[in-house]
């Protein structure tokens, strides 16, 4: 089991389409929440009177690496302003959250775990030497409160106990004091025991519980990866066992697990919360770093290239709370929502559909993905997910030029001042692998570089479009890590208003997406044709997708979900065609905001 380490933001940089994706994010909602959203702008964390729990830490967790990856001086200064304010309110005891001392026993300490993780992120980006001492005092105080019985884990802090291990790991490397190991044991002992809960995941109920909450479960997948060394435990790949249960009973075509807001089964009309996408990606990043197991990297890129862009508008000013595999409309439900425990507006694109946690949290996904493109261990550098990016240290530099996943050619330019080895992960679906024009084989390439050398490695492979089975005798289509959907044309209806003191106005208003084309199709042939197109200024453009598939299809009597007029039935009423065969262009799932992804083959 190889352990890999992350690069810092002054060593790794996004390039090409990945940098452009981060620039879009910087120009939109996640890059401007401190200007437009009261829960960040006026937060109690900085002395205001708005929310003083998870939302500012959530936002900073993505805003900080975004600012430093793009070397955006304005955003770096704004991040520092928030960190300065948070540190200024830290108590002599070490307590840092905006909560009166007498209320600490009833304050959910999930916020302590989250802000401790943010302080680590800030230090790794800024090297601000105030942070180690401030974080030491935060966690020492947390240990004292827990070990004395003044507080205990409950609700979110209990469900997310392992999130504190990012800070424990940081402090262990600097101080390695015994109380840190004791804190680790207390957290695990008081935290949720997820392996004992798997039976609850096999038969989802329309019932809200912490144990089936999709974001808790997405976070949970990394618990063993981040905690086992600090607990002195052997690593047994619990994540694979747990994710197998989730996948079998709640899986989606794009590697997610349904959860709207708690586990929702295998129906293609159930949803998945955006926070779960961001957190599942973060879990996979840590799982790969801890184990070097390629399955986590491949699952990571499937989420990043499909589930993430699908649930955020092209301009990234609006997002959904819940996305569906078969999503024929995003219109307010006139009555009860189709979702298990979410309400009427959860699938709209807006500022704060359903709850504001995703508004604050979705911004971490792209920057942390960019930080995971390359990792290192000793004199080895590994290209984890081959997206356009570069790494530069005192010993070497590596630059990768590519349009992957839209194309499958890669140019690595490497320069070495010291000997090192470049490792390139090859996806499991790759065919006809070549390096500098010569046939190659295997799931990993080892490319040694000697001190003083400059080399260029040209790598290419192919990926074949294919069908894969889904529950209910349905099928989906993929090519490489991209899943494809039947796109549904739509018009947007904009809503500007104020509710509970939160203003929605263009461009951060709410939108309904109203369908304007047919969606009741089935595949009528196994033939699939790949069409390569130009990559536009919006990498996952809903209007100009960079690649498509052509499939032959026929309309069928599909029908609507019972008691709903804007939701398709879980399965079609009939598989007998009602139209002639026609060729239809399928879009990448991430480009198709309204879509049919799970359809029958007739």
Image: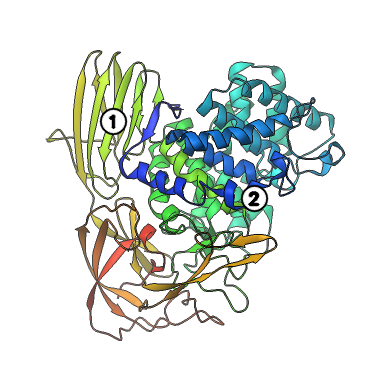
Residue 13, position in %: x, y?
Answer: 38, 33
Q: Is 136 in front, or is 183?
A: 136
Furthest residue toward right: 102
**Residue visible at 34% across and 82% down?**
556
Image height check: is 427 above or below 142? below
Image height check: is 36 above or below 579? above
**Residue visible at 45% across and 69% down?**
327
Q: Circle 2 sits in a helix, a strand or a loop, which is it?
A: helix
When asked about the image quadrant of residue 396, the answer is top left
Q: Is 123 in front, or is 265?
A: 123
Q: Circle 1 sits in a helix, a strand or a loop, which is it?
A: strand
Residue 345 in view here: yes
Image height check: is 215 above or below 57? below
Q: Which residue is mark 1?
A: 399
**Residue visible at 64% across and 16% down?**
175
Residue 197 numbered mark, or none: 2
Sequence-wise, the earlier of marks 2 and 1 is 2
Residue 161 numbered mark, or none: none
Furthest residue toward left: 437
Q: Is 86 in front, or is 341?
A: 86
Residue 264, position in %: x, y?
Answer: 57, 63
When asked about the image quadrant of residue 310, the answer is bottom left
Residue 143, position in %: x, y?
Answer: 75, 28
Foreground: disc 2 or disc 1: 1
Quadrant in which the C terminus is drawn: bottom left
Classify residue 230 as left or right of residue 492: right
């Amino acid at each position: 089991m190889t352990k890999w380490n992350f690069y810092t933001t002054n060593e790794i940089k996004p390039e090409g389409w990945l940098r452009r994706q981060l620039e879009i994010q910087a120009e939109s909602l996640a890059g401007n929440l401190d200007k437009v959203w009261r829960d960040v702008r006026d937060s109690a964390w900085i002395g205001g009177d708005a929310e003083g729990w998870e939302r500012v830490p959530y936002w900073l967790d993505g805003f900080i690496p975004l600012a430093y990856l793009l070397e955006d001086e304005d955003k770096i200064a704004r991040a520092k302003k928030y960190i300065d304010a948070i540190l200024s309110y830290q108590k002599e005891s070490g307590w840092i959250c905006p909560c009166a001392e007498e209320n600490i026993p009833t304050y959910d300490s999930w916020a302590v775990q989250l802000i401790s993780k943010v302080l680590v992120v800030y230090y790794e980006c800024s090297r601000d030497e105030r942070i180690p001492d401030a974080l030491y005092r935060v966690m020492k105080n947390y240990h004292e409160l827990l070990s004395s019985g003044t507080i205990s884990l409950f609700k979110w802090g209990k469900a997310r106990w392992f999130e504190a291990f990012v800070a424990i790991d940081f402090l262990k490397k600097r101080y390695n004091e015994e109380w840190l190991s004791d804190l680790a044991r207390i957290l695990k002992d008081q935290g949720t025991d997820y392996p004992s809960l798997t039976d609850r995941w096999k038969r989802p109920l329309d019932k809200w519980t912490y144990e089936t909450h999709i974001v808790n479960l997405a976070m949970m997948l990394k618990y063993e990866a981040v905690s086992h060394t600090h607990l002195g435990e052997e690593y047994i790949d619990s994540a694979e066992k747990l994710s197998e249960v989730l996948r079998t009973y709640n899986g989606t075509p794009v590697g997610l697990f349904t959860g709207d807001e708690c586990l929702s089964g295998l129906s293609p009309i159930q949803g998945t919360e955006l926070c779960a996408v961001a957190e599942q990606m973060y879990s996979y990043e840590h799982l790969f770093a801890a184990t070097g197991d390629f399955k986590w990297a491949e699952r990571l890129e499937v989420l990043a290239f499909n589930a993430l862009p699908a649930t955020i508008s092209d301009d990234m000013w609006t997002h959904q709370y819940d996305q569906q595999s078969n999503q024929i409309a995003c219109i307010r439900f006139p009555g009860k929502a189709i979702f298990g425990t979410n309400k009427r507006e959860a699938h709209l694109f807006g500022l704060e559909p359903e709850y504001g946690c995703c508004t604050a949290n979705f911004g971490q996904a792209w920057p942390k993905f960019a930080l995971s493109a390359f990792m290192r261990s000793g004199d080895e550098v590994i290209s984890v997910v081959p997206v356009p990016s570069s790494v530069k240290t005192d010993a070497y530099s590596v630059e990768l030029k590519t349009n992957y996943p839209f194309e499958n050619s890669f140019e690595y330019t490497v320069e070495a001042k010291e000997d090192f080895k470049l490792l390139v992960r090859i996806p499991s679906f790759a065919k006809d692998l070549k390096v500098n024009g010569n046939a190659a084989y295997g799931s990993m390439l080892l490319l040694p570089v000697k001190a003083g050398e400059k080399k260029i490695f040209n790598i290419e492979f192919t990926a074949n479009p294919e069908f894969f089975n889904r529950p209910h005798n349905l099928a989906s289509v993929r090519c490489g890590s991209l899943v494809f959907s039947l796109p549904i044309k739509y018009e947007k209806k904009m809503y500007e208003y104020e509710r509970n003191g939160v203003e929605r106005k263009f461009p951060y208003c709410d939108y309904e997406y109203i369908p304007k084309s047919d969606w009741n199709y089935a595949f009528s042939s196994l033939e699939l044709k790949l069409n390569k197109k130009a990559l536009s200024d919006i990498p996952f453009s809903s209007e100009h997708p960079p690649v498509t598939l052509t499939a032959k299809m026929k309309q069928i009597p599909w029908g609507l979900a019972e008691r709903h007029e804007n939701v398709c039935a879980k399965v079609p009423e009939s598989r007998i065609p009602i139209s002639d065969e026609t060729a239809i262009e399928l879009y990448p799932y991430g480009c198709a905001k309204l879509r049919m992804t799970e359809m029958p083959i007739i």
